[in-house]
Image (cartoon, rainbow, N blue to C red):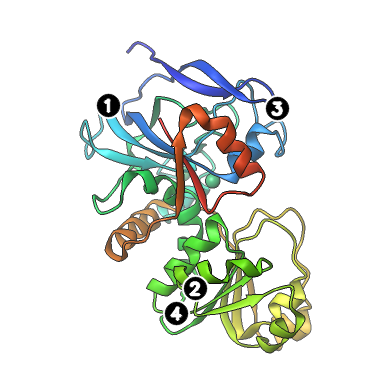
Amino acid sequence: MSKTVTESWAAMEPKAKVVPYQLELPTLGPNDVEVDVEYCGICHSDVHIIDKEWGDEASRFPKVAGHEIVGKVSRRGTEVKELQIGDRVGIGWYRRACLSCEECIEGYENLCPHGEATCFGASQGGFARKTIADARVAFPIPKEIPPEYAGPLFCGGITVFAPFRRFGVKPGDHVAVVGIGGLGHMALKFAKAFGCKVTAISSSADKINEAKEYGASHFINSSDEKQMKEAQGTIDFMLVTVPKKLPWQQYTALLRRNGKMAIVGAILGNVEVPVMTELMVRQLTICGSITGGRALIKDMLDFCALHQIFPKCEVTSVNHLNEALDKVRENKVRYRMVVKL
Ligand SMILES: [Zn+2]
Ligand SMILES: [Zn+2]
């Protein structure tokens, strides 16, 4: 099958503005679909990759980033069974998984050591008119979810949805979401829909009204020592969505005995927690999570369709991709940026 060249937007070197670029797509494999991209979300990881903040392996140039892809199937490989031409699908952090290794068999396709991340390394992402992915990790988007808001579910959304399922959060649990940004605002919506008591924790006191709109019944200003102290020992499950190191013991102190802290913010560095007094005597769990496997993504899409949960997005044309990337770089988006192709 002949190779396809598509219009894309690439950074030619680290930190460079993206420019139009003729991208040669890989050959369509038997299990692949070609997708006409309609929308692509911008995740902080795209900026890390373009700016080469994760090293040589992550960033090869020219680099076409973008891994929150929504589009319609335009070609099918010979073995593709479920997807039809014209079906609207979403593709997230990984566009391939082997589906036969131990991780894949156990439902952790997101951890497949033989998989391919959508815009990592030599792989080119969704800031392009067309892209190619394995049909088995391209997920049909329920019609109840508006396509312009669907993209961010495939990276940001699953990142905060998966921990609720994996760590067994129950209705009635007191959930705290640390950081009210792209990830955090979606986590508040999920927590509310799961029937939890929801507290938002943020250093931006001006986010209180929006946090409440997204489902928080309580708000803690983390810069206010008194508020942090009053909340000690009250939280069953804490989701840390901020990408920076925290004064960890001030946060674990908020957990009830047997409480869990799940970290999904890409924090470089270590977590320091006293073993005896916190992990043993109070039986706390500190854990982490990264995107999610296929079953969880399907579960999340059904959940979002049922509860009408979508991220709050700013949608702009791909012609403004540089401005949009800068806004993400500067943390000025409330709360998720999407470009229309
Ligand atoms: Zn991402
Ligand atoms: Zn695998």
Identified by mark 4, the residue type is Cys
Identified by mark 3, the residue type is Pro
Q: Is mark 4 within 8 Å of ligand 1?
A: no
What crowding class fits label 3: few (fewer than 14 Cα within 10 Å), some (14-19), or many (20 or more)?
Answer: some
Mark 4–mark 3 Cα distance, whole angstroms, equals: 43 Å
Q: Is mark 1 within 8 Å of ligand 1?
A: no
Name which of mark 4 and mark 3 comes first in the sequence.
Answer: 3
Q: Which of the two residues, 31 or 218, is positioned nearer the viewer here?
A: 218
Judge left or right: residue 303 versus residue 23: left
Mark count: 4
> In what element is the residue under mark 1?
strand
What crowding class fits label 1: few (fewer than 14 Cα within 10 Å), some (14-19), or many (20 or more)?
Answer: some
> In what element is the residue under mark 4?
loop
Nearer mark to the viewer, of 2 and 4 = 2
What label sits on residue 321 in the rendered view? Answer: none
Q: At 39% across and 13% down in the image, what residue appears?
A: 3
Judge left or right: residue 327 versus residue 114: right
Is residue 82 visible in the rendered image? The answer is yes
Nearer mark to the viewer, of 2 and 1 = 2
